[in-house]
Image (cartoon, rainbow, N blue to C red):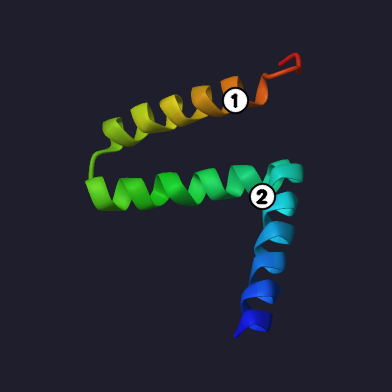
Amino acid sequence: MDNFIQVTSTKLKEWGALFQSQRKIQLGALAVYLLFWLFSSGSLSTTIWVGIGVGLGWMLGRGGGQNI
């Protein structure tokens, strides 16, 4: 059981590092999130506002020490 937890933890760390380093994966995850939001809320205008909010938060979060 300890080995399973250690292997799973290692894989999750690898996937986290990959997610943080690959912009295409980040944009894909954002697109999937917005599609799920659209299908669950049923409101295109709400989905657009959520997309704008998430995008701004993402840009501000990535802006630490970087010029956008």
Number of numbered tags placed on the structure image: 2
Determine the residue positioned at 65% across, 66% down: 9
In the picture, measured across the screen, residue 27 lies left or right of residue 39, that is: right
The residue at which mark 2 appears reads as 25
Whole-number angstrom distance, CA of label 2 to CA of label 1? 17 Å
Amino acid type of disc 1? Gly
Q: Earlier in the sequence, mark 2 or mark 1?
A: 2
Q: Quadrant of residue 51?
A: top left
Q: Which residue is mark 1?
A: 61
Q: Write the residue at 24% across / 46% down.
A: 41
User: What residue lies at 66% left-to-right and 49% top-to-bottom?
Assistant: 25
**Residue 43 image label:** none
Q: Is residue 35 above or below residue 55?
A: below
For the N terminus, the quadrant is bottom right
Residue 47 position (above or below residue 18): above
**Of 63 and 9, the residue lying toward us:** 9
**Foreground residue among 66 and 5:** 5
The residue lying at 70 percent from left, 58 percent from top is 13
User: Marks 2 and 1: which is nearer the front?
Assistant: 1
Q: Which picture quadrant has residue 61?
A: top right
SS under mark 2: helix
Q: Is residue 48 left or right of residue 29?
A: left
Q: Position of residue 18 (x, y in %)?
A: 74, 53
Which structural element holds mark 1? helix
Give the residue type at disc 2. Answer: Ile
* Residue 15 vs residue 26, the one in the foreground: 15
Q: Quadrant of the C terminus?
A: top right
